Amino acid sequence: MPPFARNLVVWLILAMCVAATVWAVSFRPTPKADFTFVNSAEIQSVDPAVITGQVEGRISDALFEGLTSWDPKTLAPRPGMAESWTISEDKLTYTFKIRPDAKWSDGSPLTAHDFEWSHRRTLDPQTASEYVYQLFYVKNAEKYASGRVEAGDRVEIELNTPPRGGPLHARGEVLKGKFVSVTPPFPKADEPEKKAPKRVYIVEIDGHRRSFEPGKGDGDGGCKQVLLDFAEVGCHALDDSTYEITLGYPTAFFLSLTGMYTLYPVNRPCIDEYGFPEWTKVEYLVTNGPYRLKERLLRERIRLVKSDTYWDREHVKLDTIDALVIESETTALNLYLKGEVDWIPSVPTTIVKQLIQKYSRELTPTPYFQAYFYRINVTRPPLDNPLVRRALVLALDKRAIVESVTRAGETPARSLVPPVIKNYPGFTSYESGMCGDFDPVEAQKLLAQAGYPGGRGLPKIPLLYNSDEAHKMIAELVQRQWKENLGIDVDPQNQEWSAYLAAQNHLDYSICRAGWIGDYFDPATFLGMFVTGGGNNETGWSNARYDELMRNSDREPDPTKRLRLMHDAEEILMRELPIIPVYFGVSKNMVKPYVHGLYGNVLDVHPLGRLSVDRDEKTEFLKSEGSR
Amino acid sequence: MIAFMFKRLLWIALTLWVVFTITFALMRSVKGGPFDRERPMAPQVKKNMERRYHMDGTWLEQYGYELGRDLTGDLGFSTRLEDYSVNEIIADGLPKSFTLGILAMMFAMSLGFTAGVISAIRRGTLLDFTLMSFATAGIALPSFVVAGLAIMLFVFVWPLFPVAGFGSLRQVILPSLCLGAPYAAEIARLVRTGMLDVMGKDYIRTAYAKGLMTPAVVFRHALRGALLPVVSSLGPAIAGILTGSMVIESIFAIPGLGYHFVQSALQKDYTLAMGLVLLDTTLLCVMNLVVDLLYTVLDPRVKLE
């Protein structure tokens, strides 16, 4: 290479460095929002039908609104898109009156048909909604979603092509007929298929038998899917303003569920036009809640602006809200202490006690609908012996755990359902718990009875938890207590999140950490886990009487009797102990004192549409902060 | 030259394919999958999800599908960030990682070269000792310690910079300093060693004998010779620094790619993890190629083979 070329290359590289630096330092900062909070993780999606978590819920609750919405303090369902409703005598039929001023953010009216369309979409297997079971209380909804039809059922066949002239992503054209047979036939309900075979359906349409094959191309007999006729499902728009839902059995908490994101309406023209997930892009998204999506920067921030079409816009106080995506609790706390954010939904466990003392006005832990417990694999000896399980429970001093590890005012637990439901006759205080209190002497007796006096003859028991500092500290404390009180050797093992979940799911553990947060405000969200074969059972435990009580409680229209039935079920659970209750959690929101409308509540749900910031208080607060 | 380039590009393609295959097999052989959740999905729901992501076939079918799709440049949809395709996530995160990486690299090079040269000239003095102690500390200290110290000093004690976030120059200075620190230390040590090596050579003595001043000798003659080892270490370093750092990004809440990298592996987000692995491999191969090409520019004795 000649020298001048060599020099040229060197200069070129230098120029590139300069250009890169100039590019790197050019920013267009966004002005601060009226209210900024830390939303711990990047949301799974904006689409309310597919989301599952608290982080997603916060954004979804601001963007959309269901038939009802929850009171920020009591969580009681209040009128949302429905201005009123009636419930039939048998508690099976709910008739909602959609408010006349219900509007989408593009200004178009929102009607009962939007709800029918959205609920069908959530149930559609192609939507792959993870929380679809929240709709299974509706008559025939589960049958529709599962696609298992029986001979004689009315069915609908979705063809591969959308109706002529329709939008690109619209549902395929739908034929209706009577289902005759399918080859190969569906397996029995409790035999999951590893891989679905290609199926051929025979359906009678207008007296002619035709065959359909889902997954086959555009040609004759090809279709997307064959499902139960949606007309058979208990969701019907009677006219533009009347929406009727018929349930399979009386469900005491159904009205609350209508305020949950899985049942939110979504905009049909928008989805038909752009499809999933394109429709969730900021430039296309049409919503119906108190806020609109202004900007979404991946793993950075979500900017919400007040909607000018929301029916209750008068009561929406904040014009702009920023949700920052920050996963590190320490970073979030630093931002909060520096006044960069107004609300953080949790604080690091390691310093929670000091923070509560120093910032007593801003950090007030509140009882939360959450239980921390250990699952026991009851299929694995020696844990299949109830005496051993009982001994383990009695040898555990839970008070020591909440006092030395969690330290935010958690309640040690002696049952599963957190003590926050009024009228539920279960747990009210630690002293009156269902399973036994800390009693090492009794525990040793039980263990001797089981054939392991002084822990002799017991193999080392592995204790599984997902990698996390707090879980580790608890597991080590448990290990020490069982060693001291029973002479049992425990081997705490940690696994990263998805391996831990898989181990739990496949019963590939002996004892494992677990946590549960109620989906809706009812004991059933906890007790429903442990019915035989339930997806969340994960202990191998099964009790016919328990299943029966839970089934009866589902169908019991009288609320007091219903709670009684569930309480009886919980007593069985606490006698058999496929789980070891540890403690009931508290929510650890830290909020600036000038923020109003954010109440500690048991589901830890805080609708953004109800928040306000007092400017004068804020100025004063910042001034006093500065002088501190 | 053309034959050389052609051969290298062929090798890069082959490397990518091997990396793809190994990653594919490794991801599927560890416990847990993308649809294992805290609340296990009903089998029907899980099947729906698998169908949506084309993960309902046998491994071989999935391998064929994924390889075919990735070859067209479409890396598929993330199984966790459901609103985004992997291409979108990379397009969004890469510029942010680049921003941080470029600033960190500029900082590392300017500090590293200065410290290395000074250390070499003032060899054995207190200054040399101090600088090299810092360099050793920079390499030895893990980045979360450096970042923690920096936040304590420059955010809380002496409030010069904001705590975290991304969107203004002030917000990226501290993280890029922390990210660049170990690279600066590494460069300083390499430059010092290289310089000392060269300073003993005959042509440097000749330069001094001609009556040249120290700066002229150092910059025109010595530094050039000392540059080669630095350049060869810079290639992989740049590739690594540009794709982001998990620790720095999470401490300073920088929305770059480093965090996705770790998170996608932990969450078994097969598509996203694969996309990022392929991206990283490509960057690394390309940087190595660039380094090899630069060699011929810096050192006339090197010929492309």
Image: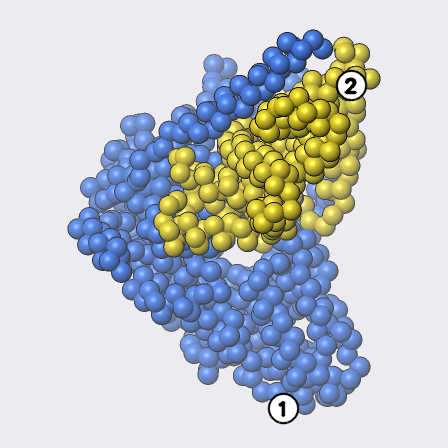
Chain colours: A blue, B yellow
Q: Amino acid at mark 1?
A: Val
- Residue B148 position, x and y percent, is 50, 53
Q: Is residue A399 visible?
A: yes
Chain of the residue under the numbered disc 2 shown in the image: B
Local crowd size for mark 2, using a 10 Å CA cut-off: few (<14), some (14–19), many (≥20)? few
Element under disc 2:
loop
Q: Amino acid at mark 2?
A: Arg
Q: Which mark is residue A441?
A: 1
Does residue A430 sit above or below A2 in this rendering? below
The residue sitting at 44% across, 34% down in the picture is A297
- Residue A255 position, x and y percent, is 38, 53
The residue sitting at 26% across, 57% down in the picture is A625
- Residue A350 position, x and y percent, is 49, 65
- State the residue in front, B211 or A217: B211
Quadrant in the picture for the N terminus of chain A: top right
Element under disc 1:
helix
Q: Is residue A99 visible?
A: no
Q: Which residue is mark 2?
A: B301
Q: Nearer the viewer, mark 1 or mark 2?
A: 2
Question: Along the horizontal axis of the image, is B194 left or right of A436?
Answer: right
The residue sitting at 68% across, 30% down in the picture is B226
- State the residue in front, A445 or B119: B119
Number of numbered tags placed on the structure image: 2
Chain of the residue under the numbered disc 1 shown in the image: A
